Image (tube, grey):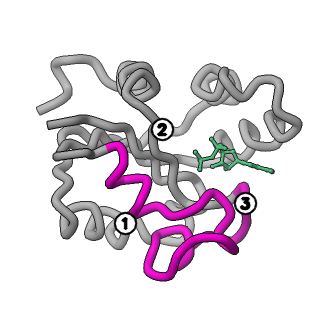
Amino acid sequence: MERTLSIIKPDGVKKNVIGEVIKRFEANGLRIAAIKKIHMTKAQAEGFYAVHRARPFFGSLTEFMSEGPVVTIVLEGNNAIAKNRELMGATNPKDAAAGTIRKDFAADIERNVVHGSDGPETAAFEISYFFNALEIF
Ligand code: GDP
C-alpha cells in the first residue's frame, strides 16, 4: 500500500470535472483516503511548489494555483504514485497518451487539471502540507 497526493487544480474545478477525475481514480484501484476543497493564497502555493522556485514559470504557476479553489486528495493503493501519474498523463497535454486525464481535460502545459506526487519523499511532504494524521483514513 502506498499513498500519494493528488490535486484537482483551479482549471479542473472550474471545468466541473471533479467527479470525472475521481471516478478514474476509483475505477483504477485507487481509494480516497482524504479529501478537501481549499483556496490557497499565493504564499501557500509558493510553499507547496518550493522545489520549482528557480523555474521560469514559478510566478505564473503559483498565480494559477491560487486563482481559485482546488481539491486536494490523498490517494491510497498499490503503486499509487506511479498509477496516479499514469492516469494523469504527460505534463503537456499535447504529449499525453489517449485516455489520460490531461489529454481529455487539460488546456495547456500549465493549466493541466491535475497534480500528482512524483516520488515517495515528495508524496510524504505534499500529503503533510495539506493533511494531518487525524484526517487520513
Ligand atoms: P508534473 O509533475 O507533470 O505536474 O510537472 P512538473 O513537476 O514538471 O511541473 C509542475 C507544474 O508546473 C506542471 O504540472 C504545470 O502546471 C507547470 N509547468 C510545467 N512545465 C511548465 C512550463 O514549461 N511552462 C509553464 N507555464 N508551466 C509549466
> Label 3 amino acid?
Ile
Residue visible at 63% across and 57% down?
A: 91
The answer to which image quadrant residue 60 occupies is top right
State the residue in front, 91 or 24. 91
* Disc 2: residue Cβ within 8 A of ligand 1's nearest atom: yes
Residue 109's label in the rendered image is 3
> Label 2 amino acid?
Asp
Residue 21's label in the rendered image is 1
Q: Residue 106 in the image: state x and y as whole percent.
A: 61, 70
Residue visible at 50% across and 60% down?
A: 13
Q: Which of pointers 2 and 1 lies earlier in the amino acid sequence?
A: 1
Q: Residue 25 in the image: state x and y as whole percent.
A: 27, 61
Q: Are marks 2 and 1 in contact (CB under 8 Å)?
A: no
The answer to which image quadrant residue 22 occupies is bottom left
Q: Residue 122 in the image: state x and y as whole percent.
A: 46, 26
Q: Which residue is mark 2?
A: 118
Tell me where the magenta segment starts and ends, as one range.
Answer: 81-110
